[in-house]
Amino acid sequence: MGNKKNYFITTPIYYVNDSPHIGHAYTTLACDVLARFQRLDGLNVKFLTGTDEHGQKVEKAANNEGITPKKFVDKMSKNFSELTKSLNTSNDIFIRTTDKMHIKSVQSLWERLESNKQIYLDKYAGWYSVTDEAYYSQDEVTKINNENIAPTGAKVEWVEEPSYFFKLSEWQDPLLEFYQKNSDFIAPESRKNEVISFVKEGLRDLSISRTSFKWGVPVPKNSDHVVYVWLDALANYISALGFPNTKDQNFADFWPADLHMVGKDILRFHAVYWPAFLMAANLPTPKRIFAHGWWTNEGKKISKSLNNIVDPLELLQSYGLDRIRYFLLREVPFGSDGNFSKEAIFRRSNNELSNDLGNLMQRVFSLIFNNFEGMIPESGSWTSEDKKIIKQSNHLIEGVRQEISKQCFHKALDKIWFVIMSANKYIDQQAPWNLKDKDINRMKTILYVLTESIRHISIVMQPFIPNAMQKVLDYLSIPKEMRDFSKLNDKFQITAGTKIIKPKAIFPRLDEAKENHDPV
Ligand code: MSP
């Protein structure tokens, strides 16, 4: 692997009982921005996503359609793998929990836990929610309209069956100690406090097998039981790297994961059960779990029953991928909940992408095209205003890197916007369009400074809006191998005399009257 640092990032694997919606696209896109960013920053990245295909919920969905679970999951998993393509996701692996190698891996993890005396056979009697695929205690269940309901709003049913248990209760203190020693393990901070309080309240042993249905990984040496779907699902993060073969180069290079990105609803599984399973199996724990917030649609919870699912494919069709990528990562502080609305997409897109960013680039490129035969002009010496723009552009990557290392996409974009607005102010003040007859050399310098600033902005923005920035870098005739972050310094300044390509509008304004827009 040379001297490159490795970086392993994962999305949750998606349940196949539903069609993909905006929530799934959100997690995947956030990871995609991070994966692209780290690659451009010189890291050796492995980016994993996939589908979670076992469990009672999936078995029920298949029964409802009157087909075998296998047929059902083959069909449904495709919707997700196709979504990753439509989103232009740069994932390296797409795992399915029905893959043979994954099943073997889950069984090996089970055997490790068993040989470490972490599993015993008993009986489960308690509440289970098929929707959440989770167990709930009596005090978590409330009766609403004669139905038993979990804190998530999902229905629960009473289950009594033989079950294997994992000795989770033994891991309460080691987990608390682990959180204390690794203060960056759970983010954001507010979520971390929730997890710590949950663990402090006491952990009960966890039922990790089921006997009342069949669609799952058989428990080794007792195939009356299937492995609890969360133990099965969490193991995807290591089976994708070749576990149980810990000598596998992928496992050696990429485990432990640098980041598991999850939604807030599934933080407990990742921040409590997963590190406990791993510690109990003598395996290293992941470095960080980030729990992002949830999207509502025009103020309402997104759900099938409310018939307000936001279909990511329709969004792409209407607005184009880059506008959606930008909107989702800019609209809400990452970690908080957000509201999805058409009005907000229009506002962000027209004010920020079209006016601030698109117009700046368009103005600079047109001036070069109309006055200098499309050749980047030679720069004279720099005034303090010129130096300020160059300095801000040179420092941009540092600031953005810092925010990205904390998954603060909105702050990273704020920092990029600061430079964009500064360049807009500069062009207005310097008014290069007035200088052709008065001082052509000054006009050249201003356009050179702006082009260099645009070079920085577009290289740094690639992870967020890759298609649009690729176009801009193509317009500037910057070769592919000159587009990574190591080129963001004076040594690689844009070369005067380079011929630019005649630009087209980068982000045409969205028009209320039109349904489908230019697919940027
Ligand atoms: N299969 C489990 C994950 C196993 S990972 C080892 C699962 N799947 S899921 O398909 O239900 O959810 C996947 C992700 O989508 C979760 O991170 C969840 O938070 C996210 N979202 C689902 N609806 C969402 C919104 N409305 N908004 C944002 N994200 C949401 O859980």
Image (tube, rainbow, N blue to C red):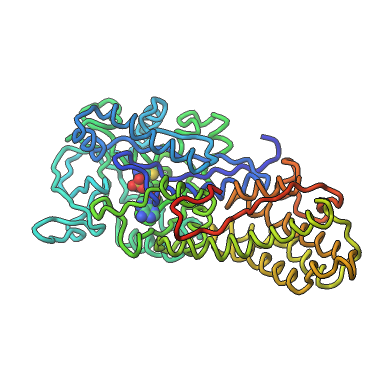
Task: Tell me where residue 52 appears, x and y as whole percent.
Answer: 35, 38
Question: Which residue appears farthest toward the left when viewing the image?
Answer: 146
Left or right? Give the position of 140 relative to 45. left
Q: Nearer the viewer, residue 225 or 111?
A: 225
Q: Nearer the viewer, residue 128 or 437?
A: 437
Report which quarter residue 371 is drawn in: bottom right
Q: Nearer the viewer, residue 139 or 142?
A: 142
Task: Tell me where residue 396 appears, x and y as whole percent.
Answer: 69, 61
Q: Quadrant of the N terminus?
A: top right
**Residue 273 seen from this side:** no
Left or right? Give the position of 384 relative to 325. right
| Vertical placement of residue 393 versus 72, above or below | below
Residue drawn at x 30%, y 54% is 308
Please count the marks in the image: 0
Residue drawn at x 30%, y 51% is 169
Question: Which residue appears farthest toward the bottom when viewing the image?
Answer: 429
Q: Nearer the viewer, residue 27 or 205?
A: 27
**Residue 208 seen from this side:** yes
Left or right? Give the position of 366 relative to 133. right
Task: Tell me where residue 448 appears, x and y as whole percent.
Answer: 82, 59
Residue drawn at x 42%, y 26% is 101
Task: Tell me where residue 328 appears, x and y as whole percent.
Answer: 48, 57
